[in-house]
Image (tube, coloured by chain):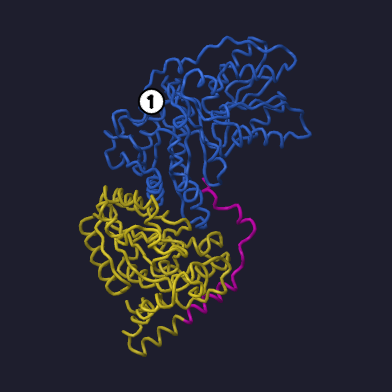
Chain colours: A blue, B yellow
Amino acid sequence: MSRIISYGEAIREATEQEMARDPNVIVMGIGVDDFKAVFGTTGGLLERFGPERVFDTPLSEDAMTGVAIGAGLAGLRPIHVHIRMDFVLLAMNQLVNLAAKTRYMFGGQMSVPIVVRSVIGRSWGQGAQHSQGLHSLFTHIPGLKVFAPSTPYDVKGALIESIRDNNPVMFVEHRMLHYITGDVPEESYTVPFGKARILAEGDDVTIVGISYMAVEAMRARTHLSEAGISAEVIDPVSLSPLDIDTIVESVRRTGRLLVVDSAWTNCGMTAEIVAQVAERLSGAREVRYARMGYAPVPCPTTKNLEDLFYPNSQTIAQTAFTLCRENEPIFAVAHREAAEVSAFKGPF
Amino acid sequence: MENGHGRREEGARVYPTDKVKSPVHLSIGQEGIAVGVCEALRPDDIVFGTYRGHAVYLAKGGDLNQMVAELYGKDTGNARGKGGSMHLVDVPHGVMGTSAVVGTTIPHAVGYAYALRLQKRDQIVVSFFGDGATEEGVWAESMNFAALKKLPVLFICENNFYAVHSHVSARQATDDICARARAFGVPAERIDDDVVALYETVARVTAEMRRTGEGPYMIEVRAYRWKEHVGPNEDYQYGYRSNEEWAPWKQNDQVARLAALLDGAVRGRIEAEVEASIAAAFAYAEESPFPDGAELYTDVFVEA
């Protein structure tokens, strides 16, 4: 049975259901067992499953990632939670040199069934070190899978899929998505890797929105409809493996592609998606392309600069409009801040 | 036990490296550490090692044929040639992997021990690493967590004094690695290259871990890397270390010491067996095929 819950609650519910189903699932990370429970996403797990399966860690991201890998080699299924993806940089050696390569360099004798959850993106003046979306660093690496779902339905199914997967999975959650609500079945289900979701159909332009930018792309679609432009919005859901087929087929129809990431554009997912589409449609279809993402600077803290740093539904709509009607005057959309951004009152 | 010592040490020592087609970091001079530790373990105990891991691999029971085939890059190697000398593995014998990035398997041993406790299994996990690894942040982080959770991990620090060509005195402010371990709450002691004393200590420590279900413990074992950092040659002519420095360690050769404990006839039989097994392993590797080209793309992920 389906009911409306938040993205954050869907994460919690998925974790609880998997922990109940499989005693090898454990949750570890800084603050997972405290009263704030990583924005509520690990709430109640300690009480139900005990301190051996749900435990706080020292501030040792490097070694604790190695501990998760070692526990995974012994048959556990650790979920290692980072309240910010910025902190995952401290674990890059274990993730890139060890987790991603263990199966290959040991000839398939071992596997590393770990899930690394981390939170990206804006909330409220988080500044340069509490905002980065670094998922492209991981999509570059063979041996890692990367999920970045945008809807409550997909986040529950994708997390369950990740926990059951026998490979290392980077699970990316935008902070603002935690508040988004939607229909989520109570029962357990999975959402597969490598399958994009068409959030809304359209004929004039394809907008691919990654993570929270899928939400903003849907709002942009509403703006565009007022100008008579029909946008198709696609959430890749799974960044690695990437379902490029769904995107290519959409662009083959629309002839226009705008890719918007919750991250910088340079050498990132937007570049990868545009390149793959261009390779596939080269000579077969004339396509106009555009990319959007974080401004190419560290994230500023003050509100007025922060607002300029992130793409939003208005700037996405304007870019898509120009892609469709390059000779027309700029598309004016009244600036209205996203409800979840306005509602956020901190502190973290 | 003595037979085991002799065969495995000779296996590591006699290993003719010039046939190997990938970089090797030889254990020669340090075999007594692997043997002294692994002989005191149960077959189902777990070890994690380093890129200088031939001796640990063999001492824990790793298959010699597969190891030599792996060094040759053959399809019959442990990892079908995808790992090589620096990534030896033998899961059935509890060799859970070796890494080319210093210190990186230390937390794996700790995490494995965490899982064993949760699963109510009574195996011991041993983490081998070198003196250089104790300079890595991950060593300190791992010691802290292992002590915090009282995990049944035995840390073996193989102090051979050199990180590549850099002496420990150029890298560490004090020469007391055990004191640093104790500062984290990890009991520690030092043994200077002595296979028998090491065996006895590991037997005692692991028996206590199994009795209580708790650890950790660290043993710093000082030994000497007889050969160059990587490759089969000696490198005393380059001046960063001397034959004089090597001499006492050579004098204290643990392989010769164990061999001398054996009756001449027994020793002769063991040596013949070792020579035969090495010859057989090399023949096996020579005759084995290289992996099929399609192997390039397999084993990146576990397929569903």
Residue A198: which quarter of the image? top right
Left or right? Give the position of B111 relative to A109.
left
Q: Is residue B54 magenta?
A: no
Q: Is residue B297 magenta?
A: yes
Considering every residue shown, the one lying at the far bottom of the view is B265
Residue A27: which quarter of the image? top left
Image: A105 above or below B286: above
Q: Please name the predominant secondary structure of the magenta segment in the image.
A: helix
Q: Position of residue B243 (x, y in %)?
A: 43, 77
Image: B69 above or below A129: below
Query: Circle 1 sits on which residue?
Result: A348
Q: What residue is rendered at 34% in x and 37% in y?
A: A30
Q: Nearer the viewer, residue B42 or B177?
A: B177
Q: Position of residue B235 (x, y in %)?
A: 50, 73
Image: B233 above or below A173: below
Residues shaded magenta: B275-304
Amino acid type of the residue that numbered disc 1 sits on in the rendered structure: Phe
Q: Count of labels shown? A: 1
Which part of the image, by quadrant, shows the C terminus of chain A? top left
Q: What residue is rendered at 67% in x and 11% in y?
A: A228
Which part of the image, by quadrant, shows the N terminus of chain A? top left
Residue A197 seen in render: no
Image: A164 above or below A122: below
Chain assignment, label 1: A
Q: Counting other residues with Cα less than 10 Å from the Cα at mark 1, is it few (<14), some (14-19), or many (20 or more)? A: few
Q: What residue is rendered at 44% in x and 44% in y?
A: A91
Q: Nearer the viewer, residue A142 or A2?
A: A142
